[in-house]
Image (cartoon, grey):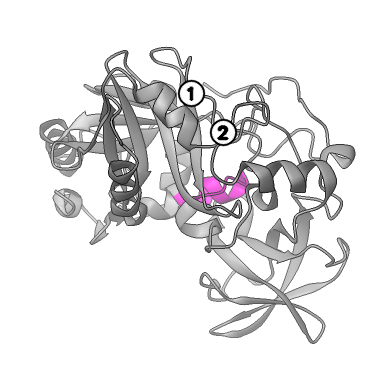
């Protein structure tokens, strides 16, 4: 089904599904306005059944899940013993099983780890990718899909037990309305057929990623490089509960938040030159002659032009002129502060008022 949308006029597809449907800029506008939906071929689905599923996931991950109500949306991180992000999942429970929407590249690693951690508990982790697909869009746009579960992205509202590092008010993600619906493969095929006949507007992965980057929203397959701490990308907002019980990596999470500062920090970049080639993940970020970090994600936004997220050294001055190395040469980049150099409990705000959500 990954190429089910290849029949859409103007579509470009790859192994992860629809890249774009002919006009990525228009697709961004249509997604933001709720006119289009996006088949997310780079996302997949795991499920966890069994009576102990929520308390079990609570004990293993960064999020408080033991009392997760049916239909409530949240997200979790799996950390290594040193607090580095290994896996991430969007989470919604239907009262009988927990649905985990994950990056496809991360799915097998997470499933394997969950299976190893079952012990004798009443839990049943399963790969549900053969029967279900993921479709994204505004809450209204996905509402008419025959979904078995719908996850509403909590970003950037600070969840219970979370903490905000980004000082921006309003946050650029405050108006982002994003949901992901889990649909049967038959419904996914029907959506592709409707799009091919011009009966349903769809958007590709380029449009989805541009809106995500503009909202400063981290993603495990992009912003987690094996040594990323949740603090570095402002993920304490929605994926970490600082007051829950023990889990792997908790000691580092608490120590960095309460007593120190993360060694790196996520920044947003406004890239100079609309015609320049976008930097790929791993492109080096320079302050003068010094390499201070790397690009994690980049896109062309329909309003902001070329933009990127990058992880840089904590000590990089917030007003330093930066450049990025691309295939076309060096591109000037103006940085926007996401995680401040002094991020930690004493230098950031614990709660923000609930931000408006565009519907």
Q: Is residue 72 left or right of residue 45?
A: right
Q: Is residue 216 magenta?
A: yes
| Dot 2 crowding, Cα within 10 Å, few <14, some 14–19, many 20+ | many
What is the distance, in whole Å, between disc 2 and disc 1 at their CAs? 25 Å
Residue at screen point 53% across, 76% down: 277
Front-most of residues 309 and 198: 309
Q: Identify whether 315 is placed above or below 266.
A: below
* Between 100 and 23, the one nearer to me in the picture: 100
Q: Residue furthest front?
A: 120
Q: Earlier in the sequence, mark 2 or mark 1?
A: 1
Residue shown at 72% from the left, 36% from the top: 171
Where in the figure is residue 283, as x and y percent of width and height?
Answer: 58, 76
Residue 276 position by quadrant: bottom right
User: Where residue 297 appears, x then y in whole percent?
Assistant: 54, 61
Q: Secondary structure at mark 2?
A: loop
Judged from the image, the secondary structure of the residue bearing numbered disc 1 is loop
Q: Which mark is residue 176?
A: 2
Residue 212 lies in the magenta-colored region: yes
Whole-percent x and y of residue 255?
A: 75, 46
Q: Which residue is mark 1?
A: 65
Asked which quadrant contains residue 149, the reply is: top left
Please give the range of residues in magenta: 209-219
Vertical placement of 349 versus 269: above or below? above
* Left or right of 191, for residue 224: right
Expressed as whole percent of the image width and height from the top left, the position of residue 69 reads 44, 12
- Is residue 356 or residue 306 the one in the foreground? 356
Q: Residue at x 16, y 35 (%)?
A: 194
């Amino acid at each position: 089904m990954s190429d089910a949308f290849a029949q859409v006029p103007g579509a470009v597809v790859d192994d992860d599904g629809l890249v774009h449907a002919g006009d990525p800029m228009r697709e961004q506008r249509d997604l933001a306005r709720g006119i289009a939906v996006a088949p997310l071929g780079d996302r997949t689905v795991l499920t966890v059944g069994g009576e102990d599923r929520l308390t079990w996931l609570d004990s293993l991950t960064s999020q408080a899940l033991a009392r997760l109500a049916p239909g409530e949306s949240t997200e979790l991180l799996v950390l290594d013993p040193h607090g580095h992000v290994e896996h991430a999942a969007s989470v919604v429970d239907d009262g009988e099983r927990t649905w985990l929407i994950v990056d496809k590249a991360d799915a097998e690693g997470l499933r394997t780890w969950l299976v190893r951690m079952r012990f004798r508990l009443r839990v049943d982790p399963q790969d549900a990718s053969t029967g279900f697909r993921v479709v994204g869009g505004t809450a209204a746009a996905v509402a008419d899909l025959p979904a078995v579960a719908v996850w509403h992205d909590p970003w950037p509202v600070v969840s219970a037990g979370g903490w905000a590092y980004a000082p921006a008010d309003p946050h650029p993600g405050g108006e982002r309305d994003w949901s992901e619906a889990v649909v049967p493969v038959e419904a996914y095929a029907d959506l592709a057929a409707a799009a091919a006949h011009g009966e349903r507007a769809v958007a590709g992965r380029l449009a989805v990623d541009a809106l995500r980057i503009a909202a400063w929203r981290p993603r495990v397959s992009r912003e987690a490089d094996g040594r990323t701490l949740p603090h570095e990308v402002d993920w304490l907002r929605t994926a970490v509960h600082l007051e829950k019980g023990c889990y792997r990596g908790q000691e580092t999470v608490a120590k960095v938040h309460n007593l120190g500062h993360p060694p790196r920090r996520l920044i947003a970049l406004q890239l100079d030159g609309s015609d320049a080639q976008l930097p790929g993940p791993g492109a080096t970020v320079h302050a003068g002659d010094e390499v201070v970090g790397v690009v994690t994600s980049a896109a062309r936004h329909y309003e902001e032009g070329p933009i990127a997220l990058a992880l840089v050294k904590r000590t990089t001055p917030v007003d330093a002129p930066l450049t990025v190395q691309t295939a076309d040469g060096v591109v000037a980049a103006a940085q926007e502060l996401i995680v401040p150099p002094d991020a930690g409990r004493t230098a950031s705000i614990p709660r923000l008022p609930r931000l408006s959500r565009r519907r």
